[in-house]
Image (spheres, rainbow, N blue to C red):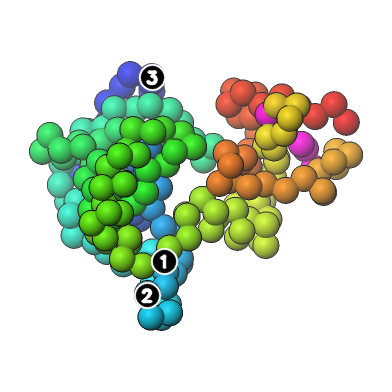
Amino acid sequence: MSASADVAGFVRVIDGDTFDVAGQRVRIFGIDAPEGKQTCETEQGTLWPCGAWVSAKVSDLYDGNGAVCSQVDLDRYGRIVARCSVDGRDVGEDLVSRGLAFAYRAYSMEYDLVEKGAAINDRGLHESRVQNPAAYRAERAERNGPPHPNCAIKGNISKNGRIYHMPGQHDYERTGINEASGERWFCTQFGARLAGWRKARR
């Protein structure tokens, strides 16, 4: 599928920022929602399952609706990254405006002001203390290693640029991955190079 192709069809909500549209997995561009097992904290200090809550709210809003999605990219898992609309409404903007997702500023500033408006008005997640989803994933990755055993290539960002480290290379073990800063795991060297990373020299 080319980058200009559209995906159109009925929505099955996977989580707060991921849909199946006409049977194809689509990651909504420019937003980031809490992970399914992520928790948030109320002002009173009570933990609650905000990730599951977001998924349920997004399902109520969009599950079974027809969507039209314009592909922007492919992510490292092979999912289509796209801007989607339902009934002419921008899904990313709607979810950020409702406080169900955050602007994913590592990839786009498109919804920056939308998120600030939701935060000022304490909509959705902004009523609670919530960890940035990318930071949550980074902490989990540090504890658990790569998201998939076959995706163990470390895409690091340093003063020397974007460099990927293969298992067994000199600095592999001491290289950490912080997805909140744009670092990432890769499944193949081809995917790493395509995304703009170069291989570590040793």
**Residue 25 visible here:** no
User: In the image, is 181 to the left or to the right of 158?
Assistant: left
Amino acid type of the residue that numbered disc 2 sits on in the rendered structure: Glu
Query: Residue 202, image x and y in percent?
Result: 88, 31
What is the secondary structure assignment of the residue under circle 2?
loop
Main secondary structure of the magenta stretch:
strand
Magenta segment range? 162-167
Given this view, does label 3 or label 1 mark the residue nearer the observer?
A: 1
Q: Residues within 10 Å of mark 2 (few under 14, many from 20)?
A: few
How far separated are the C-alphas under marks 3 and 1? 40 Å
> Dot 1 corresponds to which residue?
129
Q: Is residue 142 above or below residue 185?
A: below
| Sequence order check, earlier mark of 2 and 3 | 3
What is the secondary structure assignment of the residue under circle 3?
loop
> Dot 3 corresponds to which residue?
2
Amino acid type of the residue that numbered disc 1 sits on in the rendered structure: Arg
